[in-house]
């Protein structure tokens, strides 16, 4: 039976951490039993490279050292791989272990619990605490993981993206800067190479695979990208104008909550002044015959237009 | 079979942990590492096969009788390991998100901010990547604080709550059980009006009061949030909606059974809901971007509402 991968990785990690001088690939192949089973040099080389990458993903810094006679050796220095002293009190530890549970995305959920294991091993006093508060980060789309890695490695990505209302997706090339989750949805902000401008993309509108391009991009990444401002403007927030509507008594609570003014007209109707931004027409028609738009005329026409579409379906 | 990378990560921490705790109990260690005892025993079966050289015989001499764990040749290979980029990102992004949750108790917020600062220092250079991810939980701070207090003090709540399906406010008394956030923030509680478990979205709470009566919810299994917030039952009526490209967002907001591409760039979406009437709003909102295919009476109701609404404009 083949030796389990975890055993092989563990042995490689221990060998690399336990040496004070760089050890060669040949020495490692001799010391680690799992590598004996590999017949060809090619297969061994491929496995060894993959194993090193896996250990680096776990945080291990593995140095590659070339000696004067050209031999390549590897080692993971203890001082560079040690977690610095960290002292958390019980309250801080409890707060952190609550936060560690928020991820539902597999890779980050495992990473969060792996981080707690390292901290616990280093002596941080985590207790099993029950909390009545359970924040959860919504599970992101499959595009999330490749985008997260590309953002970290500063690699440009390409993907097919379908804009709202677009009949089909279009290819995009983007230098990814930041990922942000807001109101339960994930967004990517970055530099759109074809458009030569900053763009915000909603991950749920990315179709198919995210491909990352070789080589890191060198253009500077701004410290802060206002993803929320871009999304809020799609959602019609930050409206500057107002609209006047009639609303049937006791209905439309969310409209009332946003109203600037509200006055009764008669036994049945109230008149409200509400903020008017992009998307208001779609929202108002949801209330059907309980809302009548008074002005502006343009909003009135949009609402009538939408109602006609439903009426003649 | 557990992921080999995660198992390696755990075993590396395990040796550090065991070094300080000779004779540690299997049950305690399993709990501390968040694994089952069987998984832990699996790790303990692998560790004696690991060492710096299987030829040199310097393997880890770790063994267990199923109850306690001993490590006979403890050495200093077992130092606490630095955090990986993924690990630092996962913890720091989460800690910042929770610390910014409106309504969070100030003592919790302060503890989290202190922990975050310490963690940033300990993580060193890998902490930087965490600034590329951010998460905001939406919450109504004052409602959140009231619900949190009610849970802590075991008190009943009175709320005026908005139901979008009926476009109406209802008053009810609720025994709150827990607060959770998935994009929006919600609380789950035992509703004394419906004598059933209910989930309330905080931004739909129009008014809230803490009552003096003690909260006394029946013991119920908490819902598994990983299954999604809306969990339609198999016998809920099916609704079929066809949308054009401009209505594709429906698939992002409503959990559905199937969504098939249509030739015009739209979708044919099939979903189940306990209360199809609530979709009248959706049908009105979609306008020319989509229509309800079935049930027919739902489509009729949306049409009637539109006709009635148009009458007010003289049409």
Image (cartoon, rainbow, N blue to C red):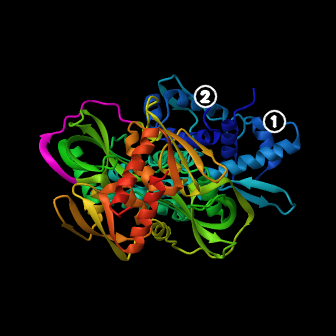
Q: Position of residue B299 (x, y in %)?
A: 45, 44
Tell whether B186 sits left or right of A51. left
State which quadrant residue B85 falls in.
bottom right
Residue annotated with mark 2? B45
Nearest to the observer: residue B7 or residue B131: B131
Could you confirm whether marks 2 and 1 are on the same chain?
Answer: no
Tell whether B87 sits left or right of A254. right
- Name the residue: 26% across, 71% down: A260
Q: Position of residue A235 (x, y in %)?
A: 45, 65
Give the distance between the C-alpha atoms of the residues marked 2 and 1, in whole angstroms.
21 Å
- The magenta segment: B207-223
Tell whether B216 sits left or right of B78. left
Q: Position of residue B149 (x, y in %)?
A: 22, 49
Q: Chain of mark 1?
A: A
- Indicate which disc residue A36 carries: 1
Taking the view exactly as shown, the residue that stands out farthest to the left is: B212
State which quadrant residue B28 falls in.
top left
Q: What is the crowding at mark 1: few (fewer than 14 residues within 10 Å), some, or many (at least 20)?
A: few
- Residue B287 falls within the magenta-colored stretch: no
Nearest to the observer: residue B34 or residue B315: B315
Taking the view exactly as shown, the residue that stands out farthest to the front is: B315
Quadrant where the image shows the C terminus of chain B: bottom left
- Name the residue: 30% across, 56% down: A290
- Residue B213 falls within the magenta-colored stretch: yes
SS under mark 1? helix
Quick check: can you spot residue A98? no
Nearest to the observer: residue A47 or residue B308: B308
Q: Position of residue B31 (x, y in %)?
A: 44, 34
């Amino acid at each position: 039976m083949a030796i389990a991968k975890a055993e092989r990785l563990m042995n490689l990690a221990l060998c690399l951490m336990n040496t004070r001088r760089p050890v060669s690939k040949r020495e490692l192949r001799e010391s680690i039993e799992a590598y004996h089973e590999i017949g060809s040099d090619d297969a061994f080389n491929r496995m060894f490279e993959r194993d090193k990458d896996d250990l680096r993903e776990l945080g291990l810094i593995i140095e590659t050292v070339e000696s004067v006679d050209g031999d390549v050796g590897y080692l993971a220095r203890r001082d560079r791989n040690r977690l610095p002293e960290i002292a958390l009190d019980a309250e801080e530890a409890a707060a952190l272990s609550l936060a560690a549970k928020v991820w539902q995305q597999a890779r980050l959920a495992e990473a969060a619990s792996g981080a707690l294991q390292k901290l616990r091993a280093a002596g941080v006093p985590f207790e099993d605490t029950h909390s009545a508060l359970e924040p959860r980060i919504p599970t992101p789309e499959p595009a999330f993981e490749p985008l997260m890695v590309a953002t970290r490695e500063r690699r440009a990505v390409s993907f097919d993206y379908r804009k709202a209302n677009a009949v089909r997706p279009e290819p995009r090339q983007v230098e990814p800067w930041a990922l942000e989750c807001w109101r339960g949805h994930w967004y990517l902000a970055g530099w759109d190479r074809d458009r030569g401008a900053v763009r915000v993309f909603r991950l749920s509108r990315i179709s198919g695979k995210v491909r990352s391009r070789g080589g890191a991009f060198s253009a500077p990444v701004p410290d802060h990208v206002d993803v929320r401002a871009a999304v809020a403007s799609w959602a019609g927030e930050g409206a500057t104008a107002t609209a006047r509507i009639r609303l049937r008594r006791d209905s439309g609570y969310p409209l009332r909550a946003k109203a600037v003014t509200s006055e009764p007209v008669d036994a049945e109707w109230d008149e409200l002044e509400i903020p008017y931004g992009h998307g208001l027409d779609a929202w108002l028609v949801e209330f059907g015959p309980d809302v009548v738009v008074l002005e502006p005329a343009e909003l009135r026409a949009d609402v009538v237009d939408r109602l006609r579409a439903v009426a003649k379906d | 079979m557990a992921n080999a990378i995660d198992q390696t990560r755990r075993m590396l921490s395990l040796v550090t942990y065991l070094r300080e705790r000779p004779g540690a109990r299997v049950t305690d260690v399993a709990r501390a590492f968040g694994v089952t005892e069987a998984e832990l025993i699996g790790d303990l079966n692998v560790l004696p096969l690991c060492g710096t050289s299987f030829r040199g015989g310097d393997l880890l001499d770790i063994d267990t009788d199923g109850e306690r764990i001993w490590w006979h040749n403890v050495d200093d290979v077992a130092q606490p390991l630095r955090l990986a980029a993924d690990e630092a990102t996962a913890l720091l992004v989460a800690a910042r998100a929770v610390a910014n949750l409106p309504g969070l108790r100030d003592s919790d917020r302060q503890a989290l901010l202190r922990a975050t600062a310490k963690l940033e220092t300990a993580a060193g250079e890998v902490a930087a990547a965490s600034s590329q991810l951010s998460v905001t939980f939406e919450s109504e701070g004052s409602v959140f604080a009231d619900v949190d207090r009610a849970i802590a003090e075991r008190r009943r709540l009175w709320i005026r709550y908005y139901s979008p399906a009926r476009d109406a406010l209802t008053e009810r008394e609720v025994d709150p059980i827990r607060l959770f956030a998935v994009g929006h923030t919600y609380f789950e509680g035992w509703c004394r009006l419906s004598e059933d478990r209910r989930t309330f979205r905080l931004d739909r709470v129009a008014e809230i009061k803490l009552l003096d009566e003690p909260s006394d919810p029946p013991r119920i299994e908490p819902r598994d949030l990983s299954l999604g917030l809306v969990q339609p039952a198999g016998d809920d009526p099916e609704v079929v909606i066809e949308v054009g490209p401009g209505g594709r967002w429906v698939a992002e907001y409503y959990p559905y059974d199937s969504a098939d591409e249509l030739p015009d760039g739209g979708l044919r979406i099939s979903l189940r809901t306990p209360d199809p009437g609530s979709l009248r709003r959706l049908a009105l909102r979609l306008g020319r971007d989509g229509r309800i295919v079935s049930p027919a009476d739902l489509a009729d109701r949306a049409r009637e509402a539109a006709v009635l609404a148009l009458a007010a404009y003289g049409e």
